[in-house]
Amino acid sequence: MHIEIHGLQAIDAPTLVLSSGLGGVSGFWQPQLAALCERYRVVLYDQRGTGRSADAIPEGYSLPMMAAELATALAQQGIERYSLIGHALGGLIGLQLALDYPQQLERLVVINGWISLHPHTQRCFRVRQDLLLNVGVEAFVRAQPLFLYPAEWMAQHQRRLAEEDAHLVQHFQGTENLLRRLHALMQADFSAVINQIDHPVWIVASQDDLLVPWSCSDALARALPNASLHYMPSGGHAMSVTEPETFNRLLLQWLSVTSALPV
């Protein structure tokens, strides 16, 4: 697994692991990197089968496997304690880490996440899957921003979106890889175990998220014993990209006032 370490380099520096959504690559977090590196050791990684972690995803791939891969890769880097900031799928990986590797995880941030898949999100995923299988990679990539970004932001960033589309087509993770990762994401369900997670969790949701209804974050916050919830009124599913100044300020504030779960 490809891992990058930025920011503070001391072995005892507070460590943040940034975990992306279905796209899987570390570049998603560029708007946060400079702000976080001033105070933390920041770990970025490309999830298995994406970006520079090219690999064939096995049949039966699951969220526990994703969490185990990350925990193992971090341990190989000598990183035994860390907080995780996860977007959508990345946040669910964090919830799985809290269950399977509770001593390693200190705190968790879940951005536009959920306990179990909402019917609306399931429909969106099926539409994207149908585009990939029946139309092709380019159509899948062109549709992706519709689920990530608000309309006005997209209108103001047409050149950037065109460049991103070209890059994503050129570096597409592969149909089979994506479908197996998507299946793992859609099958994830924490309903029976969510109250076992007692780590400090900050849940942040966009009220204009087209992909994941904000009510999913509300349900997640209510189910967790030690969670706080913040709504951003705008920004879409990828609000950390579209509203980075606001998101970064809120994130740093939460990190500064929240103690890690003791060993």
Image: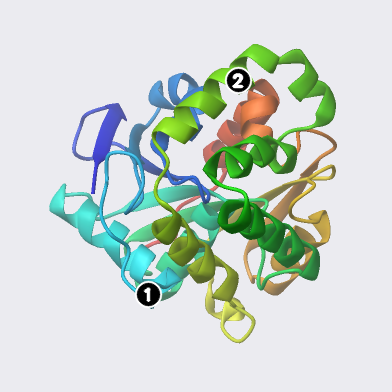
Query: Around disc 2, counting alpha carbons within 10 Å, would you say few (fewer than 14), some (14 to 19), or many (20 or more)?
Result: few
Using the image as rendered, state which of residue 31 and residue 260 is in the foreground: 31
The image shows residue 61, relative to residue 16, as above or below, that is below
Using the image as rendered, state which of residue 220 and residue 89 is in the foreground: 89
Residue 170 badge: none
Residue lying at the far bottom in this picture: please name it.
192
Tag 1 residue:
100
The image shows residue 61, relative to residue 135, as above or below, that is below
Using the image as rendered, state which of residue 206 and residue 159 is in the foreground: 159
Residue at x-position 28% and y-position 36%: 13
Residue 139 seen in the current view: yes
Query: Around disc 1, counting alpha carbons within 10 Å, would you say few (fewer than 14), some (14 to 19), or many (20 or more)?
Result: some
Residue 263 seen in the current view: no
Q: x, y percentage for residue 129?
A: 61, 59
Q: Are the residues at dot 2 and dot 1 in contact (C-beta closer than 8 Å)?
A: no
> How does the figure colour the protein chain or chains?
rainbow
Tell me the amino acid under the disc marked 2: Ala
Residue at x-position 42% and y-position 41%: 172
- Which quadrant of the figure has residue 11? top left
N-terminal-most mark, 2 or 1: 1
Question: In the rendered view of the protein, which quadrant contains the C terminus?
Answer: bottom left
The image shows residue 12, relative to residue 62, as above or below, that is above
Residue at x-position 50% and y-position 25%: 166
Tell me the amino acid under the disc marked 1: Asp
Residue 162 badge: 2
- Which quadrant of the figure has residue 254? top right
Q: x, y percentage for residue 184?
A: 49, 70
> How far apart in space, not on screen, are marks 2 and 1 (Cα)?
40 Å
Which structural element holds mark 1?
helix
